């Protein structure tokens, strides 16, 4: 491709709203352009890179026997009737001219299951894994980080249908292995971590996490090989014998203008470990008060799972008043109409401090028997130094970008949509399902997050839009133009993997752009052209080598 003939522009300045390296670089290097909040255009180079990622995914999915098809994006809303509440406002809903309700597909379990239900009826047609690479639409409250969290994004989604859990396990393992192959080939530094199944239910789920400081997920990592999302990671609670401790009488104290835990601990001259903090949620089961030790945080996903909630959000100040409390002073004494769930740590606490449900008041010397706790569960978020639930050594926390996830779905969707098959004995049974997603566009940004330096992107060869980037040092020098053109024509006749910067720009501008674009090999056609010599530069380390043009072309034919 000749840069002068393509649709191409680079930018020196970072886009105003970009927070992450990948967002900045992809926009500056002319791979993507934002059209609206969370909505992006893939420019020619971006599209080619994306297609290269899709090609790796397709190749590995096809090798695993998965079958590609394409579902519509515009879907009748009624097929999602059973989980409209779960999607809430994230689903884009629209009406046609007759008033019928439609939506833009946020994920496609239902459409695939309808298709399978109507097309498959015998065990002889199973197992089957179907997939598509398609746009998805989610009205993300916080679209951000460019392609990482967009409102329109590209997903590879696959769905498996099996006759038994045993057979499902084999489909699931096949996809697990396929995902490892895909992310390894894409050059990602990633971890497969135990993940929360959330509303899907079932026991098996793995998220594939690209390691990155800007990752939105926190991961527990242990040297024993235990990797888990903090949403899922089990916290080990030490057994402490509290029977010898003298329990004091609870007492209400005036704590005026004391709002934060830090202020409270210094006011009462105690440690945050001696404080029980409360977080109040509004849920489908009513108001839930979650308690944990003052030095820890509640993990909302664990609360949702422990109480099997379908909706959970922070309660409003009015809702807090409705349970007989007040924001900032919530405790678990004398509450009305609230479900109280406490973290297991609280079982070990004695003579502690808790909000008195009255503005500016706390209780001190509180003990377990003073509290109205409905459930105990592991609801705190794991932190570095906690003990690994597998080997009991201290864990580390790293951040990751979720690029893919595989799930056991069981019969959740097949029961709701009545997707059955006839077994060997002619008995009708629900199909056992799994689903397997890869964020294709998010993967693109995760790769840039990992593969870049201060000058620009450094693409892994397999997904680079081009392999070779020719720069003509002096656009007025006939010899340089001739040598560059010869090189370009010859390589271009072998494959479509060469880009030539033939613009009337200075050498400095063109070299900067080459570094920004990140194509793995840069060839400078400069003064050496008179002796048929070119400079071959590896983008990764900018190491240089002078080579003969004809030798290079021969080498390219043989081994590139
Ligand atoms: P997240 O927790 O990040 O919101 P999710 O778990 O809801 O994602 P899935 O339903 O598992 O997402 O979708 C499969 C894959 O699609 C994810 O692993 C992720 O890589 C990608 N993905 C999900 N939401 C977005 C988004 N808003 N923008 C880009 N990619 C996304
Ligand atoms: Mg997910």
Image (cartoon, rainbow, N blue to C red):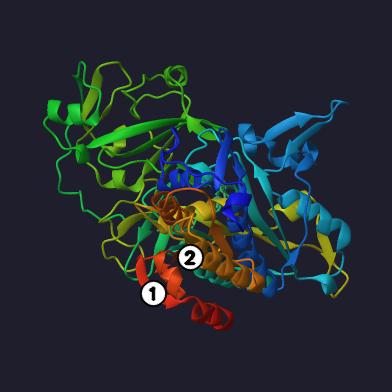
Q: Nearer the viewer, residue 334 or 255?
A: 255
Q: Residue at x 57, y 65 (%)?
A: 485
Left or right of residue 468, residue 507 in this image:
left
Q: Residue at x 64, y 74 (%)?
A: 494
Q: Assess disc 2: are there few (<14), some (14-19) or many (≥20) residues with their C-alpha within 10 Å of its C-alpha.
A: many
Sequence-earlier tag: 2 or 1? 2
Residue 277 image offset from top left, x and y in percent: 30, 34
Can you give x and y, in whole percent of width and height, for residue 6 in the image?
Answer: 62, 50
> How many angstroms separate mark 2 from mark 1 (CA)?
23 Å
Find numbered disc 1 in the image and state the secondary structure of the residue it sits on: strand
Q: As displayed, is residue 47 above or below residue 247?
A: below
Disc 1 designates what residue?
A: 546
Q: Secondary structure at mark 2?
A: loop
The correct choice, above or below, for 297 with respect to 405 in the image is above
Observer-nearest of 290 and 478: 478
Q: Nearer the viewer, residue 21 or 419?
A: 21
Judging by the rendered image, the residue that carries numbered circle 2 is 460
Instruction: Tell me the tag on residue 475.
Output: none
What residue is shown at x 31% (from left), y 17% (from top)?
Answer: 358
* Rendered-image quadrant of the N terminus: bottom right
């Amino acid at each position: 491709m000749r840069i002068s003939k393509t649709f191409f522009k680079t930018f020196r300045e970072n886009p105003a709203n970009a927070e992450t390296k990948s967002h900045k670089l992809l926009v500056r290097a002319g791979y993507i352009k934002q059209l609206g909040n969370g909505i992006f255009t893939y420019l020619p180079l971006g599209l080619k890179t994306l297609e290269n990622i899709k090609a790796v995914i397709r190749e590995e999915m096809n090798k695993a026997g998965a079958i590609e098809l394409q579902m519509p994006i515009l879907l009748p809303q009624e097929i999602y009737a059973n989980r409209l509440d779960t999607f809430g406002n994230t689903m884009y809903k629209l009406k046609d001219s007759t008033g019928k309700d439609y939506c833009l597909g946020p994920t496609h379990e239902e459409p695939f299951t309808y298709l399978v239900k109507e097309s498959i009826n015998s065990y002889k047609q199973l197992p089957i894994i179907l997939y598509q690479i398609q746009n998805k639409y989610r009205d993300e409250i916080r679209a951000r980080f460019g392609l990482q969290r967009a409102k329109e994004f590209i997903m590879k989604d696959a769905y498996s249908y099996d006759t038994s859990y045993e057979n499902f396990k084999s489909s699931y393992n096949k996809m697990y292995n396929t995902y490892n192959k895909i992310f390894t080939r894409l050059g990602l530094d990633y971890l497969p971590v135990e993940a929360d199944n959330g509303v899907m239910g079932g026991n098996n789920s793995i998220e594939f996490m690209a390691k990155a400081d800007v990752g939105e997920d926190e991961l527990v990592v242990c040297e024993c090989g235990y990797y888990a999302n903090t949403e899922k990671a089990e916290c080990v609670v030490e057994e402490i014998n509290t029977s010898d401790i003298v329990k004091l009488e609870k007492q209400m104290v005036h704590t005026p203008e004391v709002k934060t835990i830090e202020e409270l601990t210094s006011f009462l001259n105690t440690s945050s470990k001696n404080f029980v903090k409360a977080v109040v949620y509004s849920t489908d089961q009513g108001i839930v008060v979650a308690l944990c030790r003052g030095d820890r945080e509640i993990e909302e996903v664990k609360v949702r799972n422990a109480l099997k909630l379908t909706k959970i959000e922070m309660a409003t100040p009015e809702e807090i008043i409705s349970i007989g409390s007040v924001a900032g002073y919530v405790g678990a004494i004398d509450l009305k109409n609230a479900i109280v769930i406490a973290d297991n740590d609280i079982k070990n606490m004695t003579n502690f401090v808790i909000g008195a449900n009255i503005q500016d008041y706390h209780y001190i010397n509180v003990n377990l028997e003073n509290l109205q706790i409905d459930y105990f569960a592991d609801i705190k978020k794991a932190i570095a130094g906690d003990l690994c639930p597998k080997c009991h050594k201290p864990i580390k926390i790293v951040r990751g970008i979720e690029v893919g996830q595989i799930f056991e779905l069981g019969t959740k969707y097949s029961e709701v949509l009545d997707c059955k098959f006839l077994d060997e004995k002619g008995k009708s049974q629900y199909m056992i399902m799994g689903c397997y997603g890869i964020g294709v566009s998010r993967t693109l940004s995760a790769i840039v997050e990992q593969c870049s330096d201060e000058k620009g992107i450094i693409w892994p060869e397999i997904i680079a839009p081009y392999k070779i980037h020719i720069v003509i040092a002096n656009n007025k020098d006939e010899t340089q133009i001739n040598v560059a053109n010869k090189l370009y024509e010859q390589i271009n006749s072998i494959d479509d993997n060469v880009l030539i910067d033939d613009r009337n720009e200075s050498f400095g501008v063109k070299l900067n752009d080459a570094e920004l674009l990140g194509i793995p090999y840069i060839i400078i056609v400069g003064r050496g052209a008179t002796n048929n010599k070119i400079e071959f530069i590896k983008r990764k380390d900018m190491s240089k080598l002078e080579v003969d043009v004809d030798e290079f072309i021969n080498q390219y034919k043989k081994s590139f």
